[in-house]
Amino acid sequence: MRGLISALRTLSRIPCPGRDSDSLADALPYFPWIGALLGLLTLAIYMLFSLLLPDGLIASALAVLFLAWLTRGLHLDGLADASDALGGGYTIERRLAIMKDPHVGAFGVLALVGALLLKTAAFFGIGLLLIGPGPLPKRLLIGLILPFIVSRTVQVWLCTSLPYARATGGTAGPFVAGARWIHLAVALAGALILCALIHPVAGPLLLAFGLILGLGLRRFFRIRFGGITGDLLGATNEIVEVSGLILYAILLQQ
């Protein structure tokens, strides 16, 4: 249970009593379940504002902003730092140094705006398909949770399969240093169960898509950064989450 407490405190601002695990890597198997919780809370906020407000676009934007608040902007910050590093660094050492800089540059701002816009658009598009008078059943709204599960699962995979890029350590260092294949196996099993229960077709499909995307990111990060960092894990989360939301919107139209 202490691993669950650590996972909840790491990935969200949700208060939780108790002590953290002695090894932060013990939190990794719980990442998909925390993703499901975050997705469920975001979906609840989205549905609430959809009922209260006449404009679904505003409800979508408020849900996305709520998610950013709920996660303390942790992954968005990583996406911004990684984007600045890729835009301004020409060596591994320079990219890692740029990610340490607390300031956000033009590339980071563009990445942040792009991620927020794409999430808002995906929520709005899915809402139009499922909340409106169309033929699709409204129960498919629960599928909005899938990308949140998949994105946190891919983080576990990268923690397990890549070295930590910084010799001096960092926030994500203990997660990567203690990560073992058993952590990944348990996380994958949990993610598959959750995804299949939510949607027996779209769930496993989105999980497979996320893992394939993670494979590409894994290779890219090894080449460009020499491994993984906390910022790169945050960037991974945002890339997989946004891509998953867009893919789910596409699947609903088929």
Image (cartoon, rainbow, N blue to C red):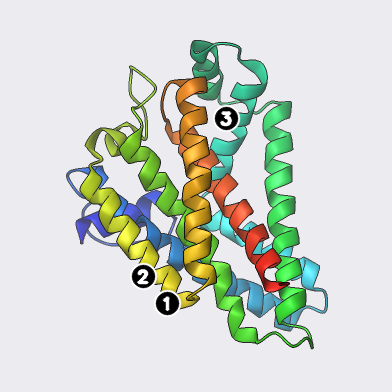
Query: Which picture quadrant has residue 90?
Result: top right
| Residue under label 1 | 197
- For the point 51% across and 73% down, the residue is 201
**Residue 235 pos. (x, y %):** 54, 39
Q: Earlier in the sequence, mark 3 or mark 2?
A: 3
Gap between marks 1 and 3, in whole Å?
34 Å
Q: Do the CB atoms of the residues marked 3 and 2 lie less than 8 Å apart?
A: no
Q: Amino acid at mark 2?
A: Ile
| Residue under label 2 | 193
Q: Do the CB atoms of the residues marked 1 and 2 lie less than 8 Å apart?
A: yes
**Residue 116 pos. (x, y %):** 69, 51
Query: Which picture quadrant has residue 228?
Result: top left
Between 176 and 46, the one nearer to me in the picture = 176
User: Callout 2: few (<14), some (14-19), or many (20+) C-alpha neighbours within 10 Å?
Assistant: some
**Residue 190 pos. (x, y %):** 33, 64
**Which secondary structure, mark 1?**
helix
